[in-house]
Amino acid sequence: MVQNDPRIPDLQDTFTPFGLPLSGVYKRSYAHVTIKDRLPVILTKIIDILCQNKSKIIDIYSENAEKDIKEIIGFISQLKTEIVTNKALKPLRLNSKVINDAEEWNKYLEYRTCVENGVPTWFNTVWLYCECYMYRILAQEISLLNTMDNYDPFKYQKQIDFIDSIESVDLMIALYIKDILCNKEYNKENSKNDFLKFLKLSLWGNRYDLSATVGDPSSHTGNPLVLMESLNQNIVVNDWEVVWNIVNKKMKENDIIHIVLDNAGYELFTDLCFAAFLVTIVPTTKITFHAKLYPWYVSDTTIHDFLWMLDYMNTLNDYPNIQLLGKIFKNLMDQEIWSIKEEPYWTGPYDFTQMKEREKNIYAQFSDAKLVIFKGDLNYRKLLGDVNFEYNTSFAAALGNFQPTNILSLRTMKSDICVGLPNNMTEFFEKHKDKLITGEYAIIQVALFKI
């Protein structure tokens, strides 16, 4: 059934058909809801934050920042109008003083224009592309400001998300984590069960996503270890023992595990706990974290977010367990057991099926590793090229040309796509497509390419 709307050519009153990329042209899809409602709200919140914090921003960046604030608010207001009225996407503005990947984004716009037989518009193009484009053009306009060129419009929200979770985090550490990571006589016989707990802790940490809540803070109450055990039945694909086999039997001296991060704040904390446990049970392992180059999807982790968390944890005198854990994390960084990188590919226009061709350096790093862990929904969408595969398609098949090494996805489900589902869950989600986007359900999903 076609729903007439003069602003959105070919708008279809249906879910995204199988075999096609997610797009706002399908009215019942989460892509449509995101472009119509969520993205404009996210942009409005940035304007609100700029207005509310105007005096603080001027204190930090000088009086000249007042002009920058007006300029960026004007840009955001115009961008919001272009989104809701389904205007054509524009090239990123270039500046000889700002050297980045803007030209590559503009080349990709030309490519999409050729593929789509016309300049892409917000609802009619691929959702993954236009959504990433929104964050990238926002970052570009900020980078061109005179005084606020390093401003992160989401920094306050990300920091508050972690600060508000401190009580919950302290419960978790006091009961469990500190005793393991600080125990020099840790009983390795417990490591398999503990591995599963740390893995699920990192998995369910992904529920707290400021992009999904359009910037509203998450609620962190109670003991996370108790909560996650109540959610076991909601893990619809659970390959945890396959992951354990890799970690327990396949890791060799100086092997590297890569973790492609998702959200800062509470989720990042759970990721760091999991990474610390990995190097506790396999001491010769090194962990490389991959962060975003620009503020991204509201709460995605940048290097600044990563380092801020370690510094903040070390200031928490009223929470000695968290402070101790902060010292452990910093020590792992100082010893170069942990490292963190930012590469433009994570905020570029390409998905991961194109990495082998477009970013040979990262693909080679991954090929030399034993395991790469991708956190969260956006990374999952990029792994699948944002294509709505049949739910029973194998994960390995859906990855296509992206096969550098063993791949683990830890994801709570917040978009319309999922593969590798057992028959009963395939039938369930075909009947209840609305359940694909709520974050209620999760996957621990592995594709083995290296034994």
Image (spheres, rainbow, N blue to C red):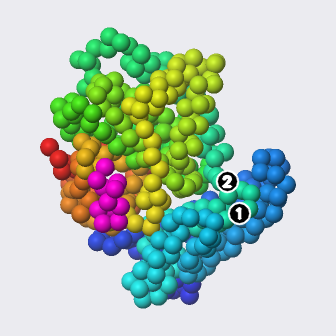
Label at residue 189: none
How would you rate the neighbour count of disc 1 (Cα within 10 Å): few for under 14, some for 14-19, many for 20 or more? some
Label 1 amino acid? Leu
How would you rate the neighbour count of disc 2 (Cα within 10 Å): few for under 14, some for 14-19, many for 20 or more? some
x and y percentages locating residue 174 in the rendered image: 49, 18
Question: Is residue 24 toward the left or the right of residue 250 in the image?
Answer: right
x and y percentages locating residue 396 in the rendered image: 21, 56
Q: Callout 2: helix, strand or loop?
A: loop
Residue in the image at 48% along x and 39% along y: 268
Asked which quadrant contains residue 191, the reply is top left
Question: Quarter holding the C terminus?
Answer: top left
For the record, the magenta segment spans 355-365
Does residue 272 show up? yes
User: Which residue matches tag 1?
Assistant: 145
Nearer to us in this view, 352 or 428: 352
x and y percentages locating residue 78 in the rendered image: 69, 73
Q: Are marks 1 and 2 in contact (CB under 8 Å)?
A: yes
Residue in the image at 24% along x and 63% along y: 401
Nearer to us in this view, 328 or 434: 328
In the image, residue 295 above or below residue 410: below
Residue in the image at 39% along x and 54% along y: 379
Asked which quadrant contains residue 282, the reply is top left
Nearer to us in this view, 30 or 277: 277
Q: Callout 1: helix, strand or loop?
A: loop
Question: Is residue 359 toward the left or the right of residue 54 in the image?
Answer: left
Label at residue 151: 2
For the residues labelled 1 and 2, the Cα–Cα distance comes to 9 Å
